[in-house]
Image: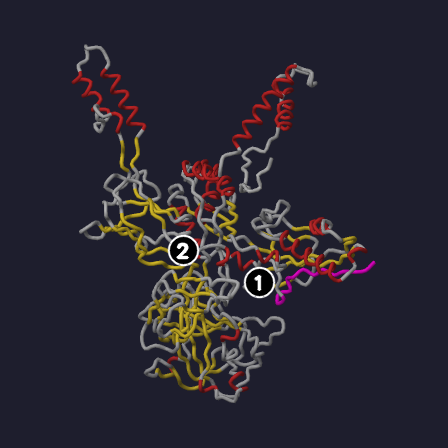
Amino acid sequence: MEFDFLPKLPTSNLDDRSFDDLVEECITRIPRYCPEWTDHNLSDPGITLIELFAWLTDQMLLRFNQVPRKNYVAFLELLGIRLQPPAPARTELTFYLTSDLPEAYTIPLGIEVSTVRTQETEAITFSTDSPLIIGKPYLQHFLTTQTVEEIPQSFRVRVMNQWTRQPDGYWEGSEQAIFDEQPEFGNCFYLVINSDDPLDGNVLAITLTGPAATPTGINPNQPPRRWEAWDGQQWQSVLLREADDLTRGFSFYEMAQQGRNPEQGADVVLHLPPNWPVTNFTTYRGRWLRCVLTTPQENQSGYNRSPRITGLGVQAIGGTVRASQSTLILDERLGISNGKPGQTYQLQSAPVLERRENEEYIIVTPPGGLPQRWIEVRDFADSGPLDFHYTIDSLTGTVQFGPLIKEPGQIKRQTQIRSHLQQPRQQTRQQTRQQTTAEDTSVQVTDIDTLEHQYGAVPASGSEIKIAAYRIGGGRQGNVKAGTLQFLKSGVPFVARVINHKAAINGTDGESLEQAVIRAPSILRTRDRAVTAEDFEVLTRTAGGGAIARVRCLPVTTQTQAGTVSLVIVPQTNTDAITQGEGISPEEFILSPTLQEQVLQYLDERRLLGVQVQLQEPEYIGVSVQTQISLEPAYENSLAREEILRNIRVSLYKYLNPLTGGLDGKGWPFGRPVYQSDIVALLQQTQGVRYLGAVLLFPIRKQQGIWRRQSASEPLIDPGANGLICSWADTVVRSSHVIDIISR
């Protein structure tokens, strides 16, 4: 009889073997362990015994599978394994000032910016992870070279000696060429900028003035030049988009179209890297920018004469800072202590993000006493009765103070003491006391049933308990698109607007029980120490806190530097775009600096002494599939056609993906090429497809920071030993899959 009013609770399945499976497994092992047993008929008494024990085992598994979810979690906690909370998405927020300020300006930590709130969705809030200092820069040198070099060796000073510096820091003078009179590839000029303040991540406006009506022969919408900044290790591109160059490649074309005079000046807006240090090149010292004349590409024309300028200046108009999806909660009161060990309190909001050491902590104020700052620990194993320690379950938001535990080891030692006291009278009681005291001076002979140990201090009765601050957030919903974070939740002086130029990445949901069960054996094998390649892979995933989907420890080769471990990491990202028929762009698999720092710091505490860890991204190769299909007669209608085409695109984006691709659906294997036969086999599984035409594979590779689709198809696309295949829809790159329906 079935009771419909009872809740249909999910059932566990620790061992899915049935009675028939157990019997078959035992029979298959007979030739190995008992080869002389040849009669396997049901009438054989041995088979009867096998069936009997298989039935007993089946009943045991049935009872074993009744373990509830709560007990699963408790078992994992006994092993020191907790369900990981959601990981927050991370991005970069760019703040733009209302105007140039007379001195450096600091935007404080914790400024909250959110998406727009609609009737269907709540606003998603991000907060800055560090203060942002917008400095006061000034131009120190203007230098030129005929050829581009990674480390410049010599410069020409052709401008600054002939110009004068105005009180506002702007340089102006006679008309000067910034490249050679006959410009060639590699001509470049350098701007050496100094400041008394840090300029890391600042947004600079380079103001240039030039003579009117000085054509240079280029296409103003596609000038053959690039802007770069030296970050201490390499030159990074700093021109975010062509629209940020209002000079249009120093042609001042737009100003001329609008009827304005180029001598009024036009800005080139540059977004500097997060690290922009002071560097010495030859005898010049400062922070370095350069503009390099590049080789004209397709649909581009080169300079037939050098652009000319009459003035040059620089100012900071904003800055970029890292931010994570989080909401800050301040001064939340938890309750009043009852003075008992092991007391727990519940935070009003959960899950809780990783705490910041010097900002997020619990304050206990005893009656009539001064506030005490308590310290969070992972567990109470090393906590003494006087240590102000507590724990927080990040997933549930439960705060616990030190428990009082009866120690089995002390009870065992007391039993040994009692056995000594019951020995023959030849050994005096005093001798026994001295012997047992030497074993453990903390043991009391008279009270053997109340041996208890306090792990962590207990807040005094009547003490007020509150948490100074904590942050909540995390989850896949935080992986918002670029340009969606635009709303300041509170006003910030001198800030005109804010935006995220990059999509948020690495936001993941909390760990499920099934994922924790799979992770448990790996954690037990590594013992929290990185020695083998598998150890590094397991601990790297643990360090990511759910933000890392795949890790591969590269094998040692003759070219590998001794003592170096190289890890290829694929971050986790939102896969909803696959079901929407858009795929996932490789830009969403970028290994963010924040995640790199998090992983390296975690592994640094667990690696062997002398081992260096290097993190890198796999080489992503895009694939665009082009083919023709013929449908079954029953599907020859417009609705069926659209549905079949959509299913094919979704299947291709899912199959050619680092997270969901491959034959097993667990991500495209590292280094495996994609063949035309792979696509044929995949499309043959689509319902309604009758015939397939020729399958063409077009590779998409990144060249000079731009994804380009190859014009000719290839029979197979090889991503390289550590590469991965991916696919996504982009009309500019033409990376979408093209499926045409033909009639037969």
Image vertical order of residue 276 relative to residue 258, above or below: above
Looking at the image, is mark 1 or mark 2 nearer the viewer?
2
Q: Label 2 neighbourhood size at 10 Å, few (<14), some (14-19), many (20+)?
A: some
Magenta stretch contains residue 737: yes
Q: Label 1 neighbourhood size at 10 Å, few (<14), some (14-19), many (20+)?
A: few
Circle nearer the N terminus (1, 2):
2
Question: Which residue: 63% across, 28% down?
Answer: 21
In three-dimensional space, the C-alpha distance between marks 1 and 2, rounded to whole angstroms, equals: 40 Å
Residue type of the residue flagged with mark 2: Ile
- The residue carrying mark 1 is 703
Instruction: Tell me where the magenta segment starts and ends, as one range.
Output: 731-744
| Figure colour scheme | secondary structure
Name the foreground residue: 633 vs 655: 633
Residue 122 percent location from the top left of the image:
48, 62
Magenta stretch contains residue 136: no
Q: What numbered label is drawn on residue 472?
A: 2
Question: Which residue: 38% across, 78% down?
Answer: 99
Residue 729 percent location from the top left of the image:
62, 62
Residue 544 percent location from the top left of the image:
45, 49
Q: Residue furthest right?
A: 744
Residue 176 percent location from the top left of the image:
45, 83
Image vertical order of residue 451 relative to residue 580, above or below: above
Question: Which residue: 64% across, 62% down?
Answer: 735
Q: Secondary structure at mark 2?
A: strand
Q: Secondary structure at mark 1?
A: strand
Residue type of the residue flagged with mark 1: Gln
Q: What numbered label is drawn on residue 421?
A: none
Q: What secondary structure is the stretch in magenta mostly built from?
A: loop
The quarter of the rendered structure image containing the C terminus is bottom right
Image vertical order of residue 664 relative to residue 596, above or below: above
